[in-house]
Every structure is written in C-alpha cells, then in structure tokens.
Amino acid sequence: MRSAAVLLLLMLGLPNSPGMICAEQMDFERILTLAVERTEIIELQRRAVKRASSSLAEARSRLGPELSFSASASYLANPPEGITVQAGELAVILPSLLIPEEDLTFIEDARSSYFELTLQLSQPLYTWGKLRGLVDLAALGVEGSKAELVEVQRQLHQDLHKVYFAGVLARDASLLLEQILDILGEIEQDRRRVFELGLVNKLSILEIETQISGVRRQLVQAREAYLSAREAVALYTDLEQEGLELSSPFRLGFPRFTEDELKAKAEQTSPKMLKARLEQEQARRNLSMVRGGAIFRPDVSFNLSFEVSGQTIPWSEDSWEDTWDLNLIVGVGAKGSLFDSGRSGHQIHRAEEALAASQDVIDLLRKQIHLQTRRSVEELRLRQAELQEAEAAFIQGEEEEKNSSRGFEQQLLTREQWGAARIALLEKRLELLIQQHSYESALSDLEIITGFRWPRL
C-alpha cells in the first residue's frame, strides 16, 4: 500500500514538473504553413525574388537622367615655358615701333600644378525601344522568380506530405504490429507448454519464434521510420521533435471531378508552363531589342557638360581666378552603326529562332502536363479500387474473427486458432492502412499536378 501511495503521488506530480514534455498535436496544414514560413528553401527563393525586383528597379533607373563627374589634380614635372620679349628686342625687328625700355611678357610660364573638374548630365531621348525592352525583360525576370517560388512551394508540399504521412503510416502500423506480437507471444507460450508435455516437436516452437522475429523486424522498421519522419518534419518547421504528434488522418473520400477540368487547371496553374510563357515573352522582347540595335538606328540623347580647369590652388594667392577657365556645353548627340558586316542581321535571325522555339516548348509542355494528369488520375482510381478491396477484406476478416471468438468461447477452437484469426484480422487492418496511405499519396500527387486542393474531413 505504501508503494502504491508513493506511485500515486509521483503520477500527480509529473504534470507540474518543469521537465515534462507535453505532446503537441500538429495537423498537416499547420505543418505546411510553418514550413513555408520557416524553411530555408523558401527563404532562399524569396531572396531571389527580391534580387529580381532590384534588377527591375535598376533597369527603370536607366530611363532617367544621369549626372556624372570627374575631378583630377595633376603635377607637371616640366611645364611649358611662356613667351617673354626682352627690352629692346622688338626695336631691332621693327625699327619704326617705339618699344618701351622694359621686358614684355605675352604668355607667362606655366605652373607645375593643374586642376580639372567636369560635371556631365545625360538623358536618353530615343533608343528604338532598347531601354524599355530592358525594363520589360527585368519585369519578366521578377515574374519568373515568382514562378520559381511557386514551384519550390509545390515541391516542398510534396516532400513534406510524403514525410508526414509516412510517419502516420509508421506510427499506426507500430500499434498493429505490437498487438500481433502480443498474440504471437500467447501462441508461443501455449506451444511451449504443449512441447513440455511432449505433444509437439521443437519445430513448432522454432516456427513461431521465426514468425515473431519477422514481426519484430517490421516493428523496428516502423518505429525508426516514425522517428525519421518526425525529425524531418521538425527540420522543415524548426519545431522540437520531442512531443511532436502527427494528428492528420488519411483522407478516404473520393473527390468528384472531370478529367478535362483537371487538365485545364493543371495547364493553368503549372509553374513550368508559366515559366515557359514568360520565356516566350522574353524571347519576343529580346527580338524587339535586337531589331532596335540594328544599323541605321542611332540612339539619341541630350547632354549637358560643365567644365572647370585651372593651375592655381583656389584662394592660395591673389588673382588665383585668372588661371581658371569655365565652360558650359549643351548638345544633342546620336550614336549608331552604319555597317557591321551583317552581325545585326544574324542576331535578329537568332532571336527569331529563339521565339519560334519557345512556342514549340509550350506545345510540348502542354502535352506532357495532359499526359501527367491522365496518369495521376489513373493512379488515383487504381488506388481507390485497391482501397475498396482492402476495406472489403477487412470487413470479412472482422466477421471471421467474431466467428473464431465464439468458437473459442464454445471450446470449438483452440486458443492458437483464435489467435491466428485475430492475427489475420490485424494483418488485414495493416494492409488496409497501407492502402489508405497509398490512396492519400495518389490524391496528393494529383493535387500537386493540377493545383486543386481537396479538403480534409
């Protein structure tokens, strides 16, 4: 009695202990939401979208004006000499002129220092659509990155679904295998008692031990698979593995749909199809840009330049500004190609071929999506038929187990025969569980392909 009281006190104290781990029920939708929010795979793709958006902003900035500058300070080791006429020299050359009796300096000696500052403002006026084409290509790049994000999310959904429901299958199968082991243990004890009485040989014991070993191997496999599934879920969601319980059951209802509707939806929501259409639009924009860069299509721009140059450090001496010059240049310029040995023509031809090839890619991808949808529908319907077959077998097994139970109660059957009926029922329940998992996987694969989401009841 004292031991029982101590045990009761310990049990009452456990829920309040700080180290107690409470099981957290997590359904699949919640797990998927947390994975999308937390996993590094999605975060990396989100950063790719941000980089593409920055590229778009950069392309748009090229449409506006640009102000640049250049500044330099130089030292001349051997500056040019000026021009000075000594007193009286011009009188010899030109006797009729009255030349003052002093030196005349026409150009002073150059200084060793030289400074220059240039500010230049340029604004594109007309580029035959090349700058606008760069903006459009950058915008398509953003949309392509978003399509990549959707594709990564779908792949994450598919991978997480496989992991999650593999864990559900392994957990539920473990419970069934434990029950089978308990029944096999009872049968083993009965056979050992019969063997001790000399009614059977040792082979019957070895047979049941072999059967028990096989079930134990399956139980170990199921338990380890469940632990691996929980760790994978924790990896995707940053949750603690301890106390994490997978609560979503398998879906059993068969959804209503038409195959044509599924094919249309799959084509409409396919990230690969979206990327193919974006690539086609990129090829179209690229063709327009290449044509804009052909010969006889110069780019026109407005330019304004302000230049300042001098030799004396400002404010270092009197009249320093006499050595400085200011200049303002305003103009409109054009730059283009008159002859390129046919290079622009080849570029246009290559761009046209890329545009034509993009349409072929779309046509081929459409056929592949339709075929993939057809195969997924086939797989789902086959798994539905197998599930119905397993359900019928399980119902039959229940009835057989009931008959065996009554037979054992009426002493018409031995304990081992009743145990064999119970094991057969558990094996059919295990087979039904496997078929439920297969049906859930097939339904999820169809969801991934078509973009449909059937509710979990």
Image (spheres, grey):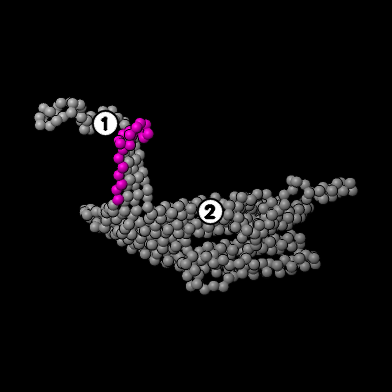
Residue 65 placed where, x, y %?
Answer: 37, 52
Task: Report the amino acid beneath label 2.
Answer: Ile
Quarter where residue 72 is shown: top left
Residue 347 placed where, x, y %?
Answer: 28, 56
Query: Tag count in the figure?
Result: 2
Residue at figure coordinates x 75%, y 55% from the top left: 186
Q: Is residue 337 left or right of residue 132?
A: left
Task: Report the amino acid beneath label 1.
Answer: Ala
Q: Is residue 139 left or right of residue 251?
A: left
Q: Residues within 10 Å of mark 1 (few under 14, many from 20)?
A: some
Distance of label 2 from label 1 (alpha carbons): 66 Å
Q: Is residue 124 left or right of residue 222?
A: left
Q: Quick one: 201 or 359, which is closer to the camera? A: 359
State the extent of the magenta-drawn residues as a range: 311-330
Which mark sits nearer the N-terminus, 2 or 1? 2
Q: Are marks 2 and 1 in contact (CB under 8 Å)?
A: no
Residue at figure coordinates x 81%, y 48% from the top left: 13
Per the image, the residue denoted by label 1 is 110
- Which disc is residue 42 wearing? 2
